[in-house]
Image (cartoon, helix red, strand yellow):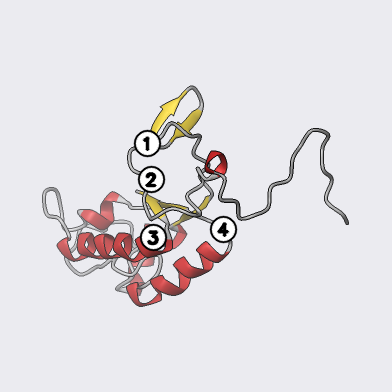
Amino acid sequence: PKAVNPAGYQRLPWPTRDPRYMCDSLHRTPGWGKITTEGHWFKDEHGRVLLLRGVNLGGSSKLPKLPSDMVQQEDFYTKDVTFVGRPFSLQDADEHFSRLRAWGLTFVRWLVTWEAVEHDGPGKYDEEYLEYLRNVIRKAQPYGISLFI
């Protein structure tokens, strides 16, 4: 079926270089700078409406990657688990981010459970997992994808 063009709607050549419509970050360097709100709109550092096109990642992030038998247990307070690699491994990050970018997405809501950060007990942080998160963020930047954690 042919797309309907509502009256008064001007179809722009896509992708556009018109700065009035570049607020979706498709033609900018990674990162939006400071994001603010005005009414029900997100705005970029230049006051332009920011359209967040993205996905939620993290269904499998709620459970540790190893050991796999932890799926049946409810108490994660143990040294013998890791959430590194949830929802995907660092080695697979480029494949996933390039696919998301090819679909026109520039924003990811990344699920982090507190058990992933502090599974060994209160005040005992999983530095390996936190480094994994930093590396995922670094991997997303060249694709122009921002993460909301």
| Residue at 20 percent of width and 63 percent of height | 131
The amino acid sitting under disc 2 is Trp
Q: Which residue lies under the disc numbered 4? A: 104
The N terminus lies in quadrant: bottom right
Three-letter code, disc 4: Gly
Mark nearest the camera among 1 and 3 is 1
Which is nearer the N-term, disc 1 or disc 4? 1
- Position in image of residue 85 (x %, y %): 33, 70
Observer able to see residue 72: no
Instruction: Kindly indicate whether the residue at mark 1 contacts the one at mark 2 (C-beta within 8 angstroms).
Output: yes
Question: Is 89 placed above or below 133 here?
Answer: below
Query: Closer to the N terminus: mark 2 or mark 1?
Result: 2
Residue 45, labelled with which disc? 1
> In this view, which residue lies farthest toward the top?
39
How far, Cα to Cα, is label 1 from label 4?
Answer: 21 Å
Q: Position of residue 84 (x, y in %)?
A: 28, 68
CB contact under 8 Å: marks 1 and 3: no
Horizontal arrangement in the rendering, residue 123 relative to residue 63 (left or right): left
Q: Secondary structure at mark 4?
A: loop
* Front: mark 3 or 2: 2
**Which is nearer the N-term, disc 2 or disc 4?**
2
For the point 51% across and 63% down, the residue is 101
- Residue placed under numbered mark 2 in the picture: 32
Q: Circle 1 sits in a helix, a strand or a loop, which is it?
A: loop
Element at label 2: loop
Q: How far, Cα to Cα, is label 3 from label 2?
A: 26 Å
For the residue pair 45 and 86, the one nearer the viewer reads as 45
Q: SS for tag 3?
A: helix
